[in-house]
Image (cartoon, rainbow, N blue to C red):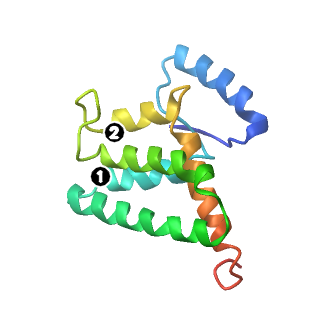
Amino acid sequence: MIVFAGHEATVTVFTDVSHALIKKNHKNLISTQPALAFAYVERILQSPDPDFAVASSLSALAATRDSLDKAGIDKIVYEDIYDEFVGLIGTIIQPNSAGKKLNPAGLLLAFQSPESVSHSTSLYLESHTYTKCQTPSWCI
């Protein structure tokens, strides 16, 4: 696996390099910016009890919405990215509109595609972390 430090300023570089590497048959590429989101979903996907892991995750994510609301972030800002993140996790146990459940190859593809969910999942996690960091006892 090849890992890149992905920031907005390096998106073009990441895209150019990743396309060149894919042409050379390197398939496992991921930017470090969405790596946390990828690892989070991958851990759920690899759980010995996926039904429980998905339910627990969805419950935990639902609770994060309150912290965003309390921080004064309008729902219009996070609602779509939240729904996309929850939708991705849900496909671990429920087939998507194409009738497919998420598997490791599908997860990697989801984070590599141009319409990648990696941006929205990363943005949602960053937004939640930001709201938590408004409480000094939570962040050092």
Q: Can residue 138 be seen in this view?
A: yes
* Figure check: 5 above or below 59: above
The residue that disc 2 covers is 104
x and y, in percent, of residue 65 in the image: 51, 64
The residue under label 1 is: 46
Furthest-right residue in this view: 9
Q: Nearer the viewer, residue 16 or 85?
A: 85
Q: Position of residue 113 (x, y in %)?
A: 51, 27
**Residue at point 49% right, 51% down?**
82
CB atoms of marks 2 and 1 within 8 Å: yes
Which quarter shows the C terminus? bottom right
Q: Which residue is drawn at 41% across and 67% down?
A: 60
Q: Which residue is drawn at 25% across and 32% down?
A: 100
Question: Which amino acid, mark 1?
Answer: Gln
**Is residue 26 depicted above or below 86 in this figure?**
above
Q: With 16 as the anchor, is 19 left or right in this view?
A: left
Q: Judge by depth and name the residue closer to the eye, 60 or 45.
A: 60
